[in-house]
Amino acid sequence: SKNYAKGFSEVQRKVRESTSNDPWGPSGTSMNEIAQLTFNKQDFLEIMDMIDKRLNDKGKHWRHVFKALLLLDYCIHVGSENVVVYSKGNLYVIKTLGEFQHIDEQGKDVGANGRLKYIY
C-alpha cells in the first residue's frame, strides 16, 4: 500500500485511512481510536500534522478535506484538550474551510457538505 511505501508511521496510516478518498466516511471506531491517541504527546503531533496536510488538499482530493474536518471535529469533542488548543491556534485554517467549495464530475457542489458541517 501507498502508506507503507512512503514510510508513514502507524498513527499517520490510521489518519490517512480515515481521511482517504473512498466514498464512505471514517468509521466511528477508527475516529475514536485516533481521538484516544491524541492523549499521547508524540501521537498527537503526528495526528495533527496529518490532519493539517489533509485540510490543505485541493480539488479532486476534496474528500480528504471533508473527512479531515469530520475527524478534527470528533477529536475536539472526544480527544485531548491539546486538540482544542491546537484548533484555536489554527482557526484561520478552519475558517477558510468554511468557504470550502468543490464541484465534482456530476456538477454537484460537494463542498456544501463541509460548509454545513462547519456552520453547525
Image (tube, rainbow, N blue to C red):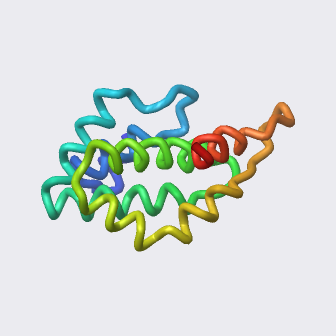
Q: Residue furthest right?
A: 107
Front-lying residue, 20 or 65:
65
As drawn, 88 above or below 116: below
Residue 98 appears left or right of 25: right
Residue 103 appears left or right of 61: right
Q: Where the C terminus falls, by quadrant?
A: top right
> How many numbered discs, if any?
0
As drawn, 61 above or below 57: above
Q: Quadrant of residue 1?
A: top left
Q: Residue furthest left?
A: 40
As drawn, 98 above or below 108: below
At x 62%, y 58%, the residue is 97
Q: Quadrant of residue 109?
A: top right
At x 50%, y 68%, the residue is 91
Q: Position of residue 56 (x, y in %)?
A: 55, 62
Q: Position of residue 61 (x, y in %)?
A: 61, 48
Q: Position of residue 101 (x, y in %)?
A: 74, 51
At x 41%, y 50%, the residue is 72
Residue 51 appears left or right of 120: left
Q: Residue furthest front?
A: 120
Q: Quadrant of residue 93?
A: bottom right
Q: Position of residue 43 (x, y in %)?
A: 19, 57
